[in-house]
Amino acid sequence: MTLKLDHANTIALATIAAAKDENITGMTVVVTDAGGHVRVAMRADEAGFFGFEIALAKATTALGFGTSSAQIARMLGGNQAAVAGLVGATGGRFLPLGGGILIADGAGTVLGAVAAAGSTPENDERLAAAGVAAAGLIVQP
């Protein structure tokens, strides 16, 4: 199964709607397929300037390491040299900050990633997970 455009749209819209329900107004969401290609990118009306770049880097971090961007941040434990090296090696597409998660089907096959940017890393991840659930898919741990 591949990540369908309908699923990607639902994930993005539901993530932004969940943020709005919590009065988080500056949300940006990027949904990619399993190859890291952007399927949908959406910015709330009040979103900041770098939201797309931040969300895309979180999503590609999750895809590239096969786990959430928050888990990568925990694994690195503040090792700034490692972070700098990975940012350079990936051309800036690495961001070990919570908010990027893997999207999977019911069999556990990774279909892509979603990342949110615009709130705290914890809120970004929780809201992105709500978007995945709204599409009937699961967050790959």
Image (cartoon, rainbow, N blue to C red):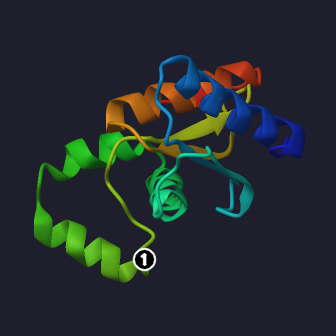
Q: Residue at x 39, y 65 (%)?
A: 94
The residue that disc 1 covers is: 90
Secondary-structure class at tag 1 = loop
The foreground one among 64 and 20 is 20
Question: Where does the N terminus fall, quadrant-wise?
Answer: top right
- Horizontal arrangement in the rendering, residue 108 relative to residue 71 (left or right): right
Residue 16, picture quadrant: top right
Residue found at the far front of this picture:
46
Give the x, y percent position of residue 46. 54, 46
Q: Residue at x 46, y 25 (%)?
A: 126
Give the x, y percent position of residue 103. 64, 37
Q: Residue at x 69, y 27 (%)?
A: 14
The answer to whether residue 109 is seen in the rendering is: no
- Horizontal arrangement in the rendering, residue 85 relative to residue 41 (left or right): left
Q: Residues within 10 Å of mark 1 (few under 14, many from 20)?
A: some
Give the x, y percent position of residue 22. 48, 18
Kind of residue at disc 1: Thr
